[in-house]
Amino acid sequence: MSETLYAISVEVNGKPRSTQVPARLSLVDWLREDLCLTGTHIGCEHGICGACSVMLDGDPVRSCLMYAVQANGHRVTTVEGLAKPDGSLSVLQDSFCETHGLQCGYCTPGMLIASQALLDSNPNPTEGQIRDAIGGNLCRCTGYQQIVEAVQLAAERTTAK
Amino acid sequence: MSVPEKTSYRYIGAKRRAKEHPRFVSGRGRFVADIALPGMKHVALVASPHASARIVSIDTRAALASPGVLHVLTGEEFCANTDSLAIGVDAPKVTRFALARGVVRYAGEWVAAVVADSRALAEDAAELVEVEYEPLPHVIDPEKALAPGAPLVHPAHGSNVLYHRKFVWGPVEEAFANAEHKIAFRAVWGRSATVPIETFGVAAQWDAGTGILDIWASIQMPKFPDQTARALRLPGNAVRVHYDVDVGGSYGVKRGIKHTVLVGYLAKKLGVAVRLIEDRLENLRGGDMQGPDRFFDVQLAFDADGAIRAMKMRAVDDVGAYAGRSPFQLGKPVTAICGPYAIGAIEYEPTSVMTNKTPQEAVRGFGQSPTNFAIERAIDRAARHLGMDSIELRKKNFIRKDQFPYTIPSGSTYDSGDYHAVLDETLAAIGYASLVRARDEARRSGRLAGIGISTCLEPSGGNSAFEVLMNPKNENTTWMDSCLVRVDLSGSITGVIGNSSAGQGHESLVSTVVGEILERDPETIRVVRADSLTALPSNSPVGSRMAIMLGGAAAGAAKRIKETLIAIAAHNFECSPEDLEYRDGGVSLKGASEKKLAWDQLVEIAHRKFHKLPPGIEPGLQAKFVWEVPTGGALPTPEGRIQIYPCYAFEAHIVLVEIDPDTGKPSIRKYVCGHDCGVMINPDIVHGMTYGGIAHGIGAALYEKFAYTEDGQLASGTFMDYLIPSAMEVPGLTIVDHCTPSPLTTFGQKGSGEAGYLGAPAAIANAVNDALDPLGASIDILPMSHLAIWKAIGTRKGAA
């Protein structure tokens, strides 16, 4: 017995990816297991913790709550796609390092996706807007303080340019 | 030649980015679920739906016929071929295996394990395993479990009590008889845990050629390789645990020993690589990581001037259905049983009781945070009883800075501190007078508002002396840690450590410390992790111990390298080491700095020029250092007095909470934590752990609970029911640093891995009670849910 496969074409981190997947394969499992993009993490698989956040056409979504087939025809950005074209850290990634905005690193990819999506639409967020934007991403290490500082620093650095 | 200690540092205490960060922000961490082994198979679990039942039959035929299934393992096969996991206390009949055999003792207990080509196929087949149960009586409430005639969780043990002892240190009855005032109350700490965002995972691979079982796991557990080997009936050197696995948060709980023995057994039996990654329900319900579940009956005896004479504390802890290290969480608080207060006589009566709940495991603080909560509620209640300011009461009873080292009644000596100064600095930082005005203003405008204070200790340096205190057969008096420092032919330095990390920044710690001693840039120092067969001994990063123990060991090894370099120079200059000066890795003659051997030259001699090495110096350049815990090595006295931990950090929390009187919803308006953990090696890392600890404390105080129904079903098996505070619930936090160095450690550092968590629940509980006080209401049960607060308000409103 084998499962029925469905053809999908998804742009992942700027590269077109075409493949065939079973209907029940989640987007996060496809990214992690088939594309070996293991930067996106699985925390709860029911849409609460936000560790699996990726951008779908620029908006943060839970890749544990989507099937891979639903991403057909869309653009997906994972944490691996946040770096500058030369591979160096983005302003936001570097700011997380600077403020110690992470400890174990497990929620970090999701936090980066949520914060980058915020900064893309609102380059000068208030603290309240930052907390709101990361409010759907759980972190157990930092108490969020140094994550908020990281996003503030990234905003300052970006707008100062 | 002895190397003099410095009092000011080049790298220690300076802002420094963590070495670990770049790989995590770029998505290049290496967590256990990222490890793909060739031909790897996947495990799904069949769990018991009953809190207590006899297993009548298990039919695995349909599951075995399901696509991609290799094997379905049941308890009959597994328990016959492995040994019980270690039992900390003296209760040999309370055996514990990864799979149930004959009976199940909690809802969620694993009954069968399905191995298949993918996790999805394994889950498909797990649904086809048919288990017939015959329900048996169960007990969920710890007091009912203690009552005569209660259903026995382990009938062979003869009782539900795993451990009970009454310690009496000092003239307790006399103090109570003579005291002018007494209070008695019950405080309840609900079952919660630090619940990392990464669940537990393990992958294993058996190599029949070498006879070695390789294990990759998201582990934070002392003696993990040893226990795994023992349960699998393998010699210790047949199990190789790889520590170069990033652990996605732990805070004490990543003790997946049962998972590892299960997966190790399957990998060896089937001859394929096998992986088990818990899903969230398996993690919350069957992952053995729920924390203390404890009530305290506290009595305090004191005089009209606020001087505390004695305390009695009865602590009953519900460990659930099996015993691992969890009963020891009643033992660690012995080392700080009177908190920061000079209380001369103490009675402590811990009881560890089993119920039909998920087994408890170690959680951040190892039982200290619940104990601090009980002590700090007692302090606030005593102040209220006397009509005295609780700050004044605390200061009156604080151990004074001129009293250190100070030995408490239970036999532990506190190393250093200045509690009055830290509290004063915290009060100043929050602007206490204006905080009181803000509270009173809120009250005048019809809101409920309260200020909460807690002052408490963080024992650090993680010795394990509670093991021998609570089980004399467990004669364990050392919890060493180690480091190997190597300098290669190119002059590059590598630190080798023998543990995995869960965000504590151990690579940053070791590189900073080694750089400090050798005066080399920490940026250039690499830190790698050995596996358990090549590692020097470590007892893992538990008990706020690594700044002290790993930091001390790394410094010790670096000092040996430095001594070797100086000896090489002395030999070549034909002088005494005392005539030489070490700077930036080079060694020169004092007063004649042109006569110098630079780092590269010294390294070259050590590696290649044996003819220039002094007699007795090994060629190559490396040094190891294994460090026993400072103050370790002693056995308890017959009265149970013992030094458990060496160092004692102090924290003072002040918080303003407002409560919506219509909904009971609390909001934290202001939060300041004064913190003294001695010399901070990396302030950002210390602050980060403290912020995170406070957030954990907010969760334990207000939101998080592993709730069970009367039927013994876990009612909070998802993050929609088990509520973890988000950035909306955790407010902006301010930390005030104070530094009282420890006289026992290399640089004066103390531990800080549990900081924040140890005082936050108490401070928030005191704030909520201050807010409820004008209504005449109070709550001493954690978590103080919106509903519980709303009910307390409503009861009083109705009574009024």
Image: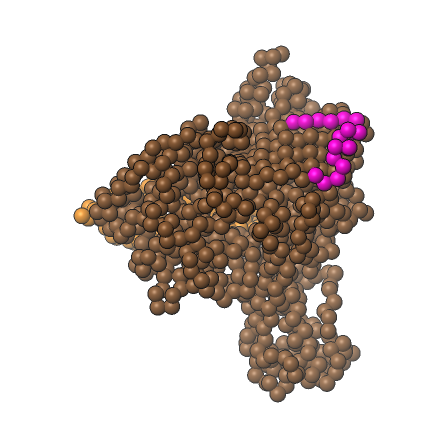
Q: Magenta span has B464?
A: no
- Taking depth in this image into account, of B247 and B181 the one nearest to the observer is B181
Asked if residue B115 is positioned above or below residue B128 in the image, the reply reads below
Decide if residue A116 is in sight here: no
- Which residue in the rendered view is the most extreme toward the bottom? B611
Q: Is residue B794 above or below residue B67?
A: above
Span colored in magenta: B168-185
Quarter of the image where one finds residue B129: top left
Image coordinates for residue B531, horizontal then vertical, percent: 48, 63
Q: Residue at x 39, y 51 (%)?
A: B262
Query: Is B635 left, or right, of B71 in this rendering?
Result: right
The shade of chain B is brown
Location of residue A149 (image quadrant): top right
Residue B367 appears at what percent x and percent y? 59, 41
Tell me if I can see residue B208 in this picture: yes
Q: Quadrant of the C terminus of chain B?
A: top right
Which colouring convention does the figure follow? Answer: by chain
- B585 or B368, nearer to the observer: B368
Locate residue B613 relative to residue B271 in the image: left or right. right
Tell how many labels.
0
Tell me where residue B209 appears, x and y as whole percent.
35, 68
Name the tint of chain A in the rendering: orange
